[in-house]
Image (spheres, rainbow, N blue to C red):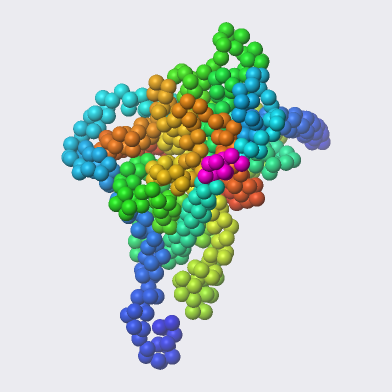
Amino acid sequence: MAVRAQAGARLAGARRDIRWGSIAFKALAYVLLALMVLSTLFPFFWMVSTSLKQEQRVFRIPMEWLPNPVMWENYVYIFTTMPFGSFVANSFKISILSCLGEILSCSLAAYAFARIPFPGRNALFVIILGTMMVPFQVRMIPTYLVMHRLHWIDTHLPLWVPAWLGGAYGTFLIRQYMLTLPQELMDAAKIDGCAHFGIYWRIVMPLAKPVLATLALLGFMYSWNSLLGPLLYLNTESKFTLTLALTRFRGHNYTYWTKMMAGATVSLIPAATLFLFTQQYFVQGVTLTGLKG
Amino acid sequence: MATIQVAKGVAVRQSWLARLQNSNAFNGYLFILPTLVGLAVFQVYPLISSAYLSLTSGNLLGAAKWVGLDNYRLLFQDSKFWISLKNTGYYTFAMLLPSVAIAIALALAMNQKLKGIVFFRFLLFLPTITSSVAVSIMWMWLYNSEFGVLNQLLKAIGFFKLFGIKRILWLGAPETAMLSIIIMAIWRGLGYNMLLFLAALQDIPEVYYEAAKIDGAGAWSRFWRITLPLISPMTFFVIIMMIIGGFQVFEYSYVMTGGQGGPVYSTLTMVLYLYQEGFQSFRIGYASALAYVLFALIMVLTVIQFRFQKAWVFYE
């Protein structure tokens, strides 16, 4: 009895501590999060605010937190005086094409690696995974020379065609997902006379939609944000992507901060919008890489 | 198919073409055909070609001449190479501790079952989905030594008076330029790392904590003895990825210093030097040697990490 009462008292004490502790923790957590969110958002706020200011007023000391007057003209300027419309179109074209190609080529390979026991399968899969360890920079020069020999320099082709020829990360991601699909489904389709391509296209692909969405998003973002590829391959201004164009704002003597910030803001809008509506796929992709990586 | 027909006694032999079409080998290789082409043209060939080029001298288009290990010898005598190595190492390793510590703290905060997690997650993740170019541009303006917000804020809170200085030059001075990039990079990676740690935290069974509480373990020891060991595989993963990514850093210094890596080479990273040598000076052989040294370094660091993981990574 006494022992039980003692234990009970100890438990109650522990519970009280936990309650107070957890309230304190939650308060602390909110404070920390609020601080971090503030410092995360401030540079974005400042970018948008600057993008709407009059060019001379960004040099006011003390600084003005909000633009006054609000200069939407900065945005008009980059789209009319500068060919920003075509930069945006180029970025969209390249990102969408690479994203489609990655999904198609990686899912085909993933199906084979997950469901077709062909000779040499495991060795090839290991080699493909191994390519993930070789950074692009190591292959950069010969890859450039290949594109040169193909006469693809100063075209968009080097930026999206390779995505149609597979990718280690995408193949791995989709394969892991396909392995979880029940084998019975495919057996049933086989008995009904479905060949491999039919099974892949009509059964596996529709079921793999979540992981395909994840890969599509990651692929789109990667392509949308990348600089090194466009920097290597594009020379003519009208072919520039948004990211590459943004690096050319810096003048030799003078930097047009308001226009540059307007450009940076524009470059952020598609990615941020996409992310806002597809967060869960994103989180899935990131955590999957982390756990399986 | 064939067996069923045989069972029925109808002796229909499939033509060799049909057999080929149904074989696993044919289908398998057909499905991975695009991948195989990509593997050959964009992975294996460039990797081998890069090794070969590193043993030659030549410009972008001209014929290459065999020079043996000369490029590597020159590289190790090249002070710019050592500076770029030092800068890259500084960038990579200075980031590690703050990035991991803050990301774990954030993940712990997010794991308190607070309201509005999805909203917080979105906001904290925003820098990760922003291109490194846009991030660099934003921060160039924040760091601007005359009109930048950072200096004005530091002045307002009396920071400069305290240290008897007028302003911090940030990207404008060799002492602080790389540090400025490091701070920005930590800021950018936080949301991503936080998400990884949050996933790891959510995998820890609640009963461990309850058992520890009943045994009288305080919050502090619960963190050190349960949380930290159980998320150590994720910590390991994050550190590996940060080191691999760190050695490839290029875009920040390219954008923020106009491709120069200045002031006085203080932000010249290995990949930026590789880019300058290969695509501005067109010294293909030399740049390829640099690429291979970079590759070797990343491999060695990764292997060392895996060797030492037993000492601190806890697998259930």
Q: Is residue A95 visible?
A: no
In the rendered image, the residue lying farthest to the top is: B164
Between A246 and B243, the residue placed more toward the observer is A246
x 65%, y 42%: residue = B122
Residue A78 on the magenta segment? yes
**How far across and how far down the image is residue A144, in percent?**
34, 46
In the rendered image, the residue lying farthest to the front is: A81
Answer above or below: position of A206 versus A1: below
Q: Count every numbered label the image shows and give the total.
A: 0
Q: Quadrant of the N terminus of chain A?
A: top right
In the rendered image, the residue lying farthest to the bottom is: B9
Between B269 and A58, the residue placed more toward the observer is A58
Residue B226 on the magenta segment? no
x 42%, y 36%: residue = B248
**How far across and how far down the image is residue B187, in percent?**
57, 31
- Secondary structure predominantly adopted by residues drawn in magenta: helix
Write down the quadrant of residue B217 in the picture: top right
x 36%, y 24%: residue = B83
**How far across and how far down the image is residue A97, in percent?**
48, 56
Write down the quadrant of residue B289 in the picture: top left
Q: Which residues are magenta?
A: A76-84
Left or right position of A268 against A111: right
x 37%, y 28%: residue = B85
Left or right position of B145 against B30: right
**How far across and how far down the image is residue B74, in percent?**
24, 28
Q: Is residue A163 visible?
A: yes
